[in-house]
Amino acid sequence: MATKKKAWTDLLGTGTSDTAGDTGAADGGPKEPPATVLMHTIVSNPENPRPDEDYTDADPEFRELKATLKEIGQLQPLAVVSRSVYERAKPHVVEQLKPKDRATFRKADWVVVTGNRRLAAARQLGWTRIDIRVQDQLGDEDGRIDDAVVIENIHRKNIAPIREAEFLKRMVAKHGSQEKVAERIGKTQVYVSQRLSLLNLAPDIQDQVDTGELKLKDARLLASQTEDPAEQRARVAEIKRKATEPKPPRKRRTVQNPVLDEEQAESDTSNVSPADGQPVLTTDEVEPAATKHEQLDSAAVQPSVPGQASPAETTTGGREQQPKLFPYKDGAEAAQFLILKMPPDEFTKMLDLLIRHRDDQAVSAG
């Protein structure tokens, strides 16, 4: 039976549980979880999935975070667990720390679950205190600390794909299936499967995925095609070779417009001078290189819209044509006409309005 999907707020809780208030008293820790703690009493998550580069000014989002903290202050407390709770939930992680790091870890009272970037930014700004919210209930169930870390990083800022895949692999091992993991993190089973497939790539290719040298979509396709490292490297070399080749010019899409085509045919039959019976030289005869797309753009005039008068057009032979009607019943044709004629900023406004209208209709229908 699939595990019921946990909302982000359900997973983190409110920070007011009795467990959070009592934890640590028996171990010599704080009797009550404070709202604000000294910086030396808190440490970051030893399993933080982010690379060191995410905590330097080379990362534009980290720079922006530091600037916000400096100007406005801390708006959201860090979600933490007591060190004793973390050690009970993840003893193997603590034992794998280097001796110096393990000693520093055991001097702390609190371990950050979510908010490691805010903690790092505050340290770099020289802060001595920081606000926290104790979430010791995360240690009550196996894997909930990992769930919280993965969910925050997936939904707030994309982490390195391979690092994410490693976390998801551990979650699958704990929860039993990709479907259960997908429900817990709010993603589809396909998303989980595609991320896990990246672990089938050779280590050097995985590094290229994390650094962005190899696009994620190419990496997913490659992982689904072969698990042979030599063949993977050969295909990566081919992908990079094709990326350096100059791209051919894009072909313009030919739009079939029955209204304009019919009027163009009528115009062709009227290209005879009534005075001497000689053919009148048309624009197409002067400039035969004009494309179909260009003809559509140049031939189109403002459509007749209800409530607006449209002046009649005069052909080369002096005969009046009826104004061209806007193709209301042909969505693709109408869209193409607007793409050709409407200024980009006005077209964007129209798109936003249509999307809002569609969403409102969907809500009404539901």
Image (spheres, rainbow, N blue to C red):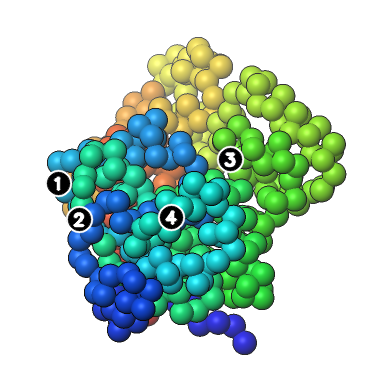
Q: Position of residue 126 (x, y in %)?
A: 23, 39
Q: CA distance from mark 2 to mark 1?
A: 8 Å
Residue for badge 1: 72
Identify the residue at horizontal 21%, vertical 47% (top origin). Answer: 128
Question: Are the residues at dot 1 and dot 4 in contact (C-beta closer than 8 Å)?
Answer: no
Of callouts 1 and 4, the N-terminal one: 1
x then y, percent, for residue 123: 29, 43
Of label 1 and label 3, which has the lower sequence position?
Answer: 1
Can the viewer see residue 346 in this picture?
no
Q: Secondary structure at mark 4?
A: helix
- Would you name the residue on which mark 2 appears? 75
Q: Around disc 1, counting alpha carbons within 10 Å, would you say few (fewer than 14), some (14 to 19), or many (20 or more)? A: few
Q: Nearer the viewer, mark 1 or mark 4?
A: 4
Q: Residues within 10 Å of mark 2 (few under 14, many from 20)?
A: few
Q: Is 192 left, or right, of 126 in this rendering?
A: right
The kind of residue on which mark 3 rests is: Asp
| Residue 19 horizontal/vertical position (percent) | 34, 81
Q: Amino acid at mark 1?
A: Ile
Circle on res. 105: 4
